Amino acid sequence: MAKNLLITNCKQLVTLAGPARPRVGAELRELSIIQDGAMLVSDGSIDRVGSRQQIESTIASNAQVVDAGGRIVLPGFIDAHTHPVFAGTRADEFEERATGVSYQEIAARGGGIQSTVNHTRAASVDDLIALGKRYAQWFRAIRALDEQTPLRYVPTFLGAHTFPTEYRSRPDAYVSLVIDEMLPRVARERLAEFCDVFCEQNVFTTEQAWRILSAARCHGFGLRIHADQLSLSGGATLAAELGTATADHLEHTNEQGIAAMKEAGVQPVLLPGSVYALGSSRYPAARAMIDAGLALVLATDFNPGSSPTPSMLMVLSLASTHLKMTVAESISGAVVTSQRDCDGIRGRVTTPEGWLIPRARINFLNRQTKKNTNIETDENGAYHACLALGTYDITVTSTGFKTAKRKAIKFESSGSLTIDFPMKRGKPVTDQAITQL
Ligand SMILES: [Zn+2]
């Protein structure tokens, strides 16, 4: 990659400049567009944006120039909900649904998710990586894709998506297997950042979902729920009760569910592609969610059965035609997803014995710019800060602990404490444990 890259002659440069947090209400309609714009990229990061005249006059003559040819340039889409690693297809089910067989009926006789599970179990990791690459946007396979492609993948453990055939008659035994064996191993091997459950009638009950997600929280996973997709089954309310990061689908969520998500700060992730592919007309109440002040997100739900499209453009189209969102709201929902998606640093603050420290205050002082960034850990001792490239001194303060400078990464208890960020360009630093003595 050239050291300096100029992208110019953009009819519109859509920057979405604004607060470094998910957008709500009218903010979703603010795209911060620069007419006749240009952008300077230095060393892989956006350095400056402005009018073509402003930017072109400041760049060095050896910069690589990309002429956008009068097109619109906007940030890359973030697909916040996909199932990109699978084997087999479920095209036959599409035809069945067209003749009136419901998704639930297909699932009840072993089709649906179970048929993909069967195909995927039979495939090797190499097969799955090859499949993922072929679809070009797409736990071990996902980690390999993250390393081997320019895209960033955030893996989610969805062990509770359906009951495997051998556990159909004893669902609670499967829930115990997920909690007692799968979750600890996924956590130990750091295979996923989030844990998700398909909470739905005839799948995982709210009680079972609560057990699994509560256990996942103890292992440090972020939480998500497939909620209220096929019926009003209490998923959104449970998401609010647990304070999950997101509740996804929400086709049947009512006013109370929306209010509860608002109160708890849960982000709705809407997946109109699956409503469309299932031939349903029951789209989620996007307008009511935006009006209620929820930080709405759009995603594809790309999977071989209920949403076979990986196209964010199709999702944007459905958002306007069926969710009644404006074009600007749709773009915001597809680009600005959550704080976790800005490049940044995240981890946990713990005592030397490994106890997580909730509500600890962390100050990051940038050595070059002297800029301070202050954040607080959540109730699980986890933090996430959006930081520019640089070297930082870190100070941690928490109730019951003295203020002191502490070293991040392989912590030592004394000295000036610094981190270099990011360790790997273009990808966020993860798992930066800060230990407080
Ligand atoms: Zn899904």
Image: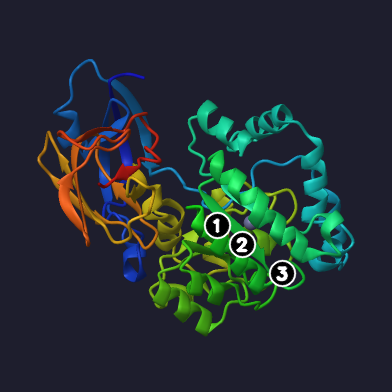
Contact (CB < 8 A) between labels 2 and 1? yes
Q: Residue lying farthest bottom?
A: 256
The secondary element bearing badge 3 is classed as: loop
Q: Where, by quadrant of the figure, is residue 52 drawn?
A: top left
List the residue tagged with mark 3: 280
| Quadrant assignment for ligand 1 | bottom right
The secondary element bearing badge 2 is classed as: helix
> Where residue 278 sits: x, y (%)?
74, 63
List the residue tagged with mark 2: 212
Q: Residue lying farthest front?
A: 353
Other residues around mark 2 within 10 Å, as few (<14) / some (14–19) / many (≥20): many
Q: Which mark is residue 216?
A: 1
Colouring mode (rainbow / by chain / secondary structure / one colour) = rainbow
Rendered view: 92 above or below 231: above
In the image, is the residue at mark 3 within 8 Å of ligand 1 by its beta carbon? no
- Marked residue nearer the N-terminal end (1 or 3): 1
Residue 277 visible? The answer is: no
Contact (CB < 8 A) between labels 3 and 2? no
> Viewed as shown, does residue 226 lie left or right of 335?
right
> Viewed as shown, does residue 316 lie left or right of 278?
left
What residue is at 34 percent from the left and 29 percent from the top? Answer: 423
Other residues around mark 1 within 10 Å, as few (<14) / some (14–19) / many (≥20): many
Q: Where, by quadrant of the figure, is residue 389 drawn?
A: top left
The secondary element bearing badge 1 is classed as: helix
- Marked residue nearer the N-terminal end (3 or 2): 2
Amino acid tagged 3: Ser
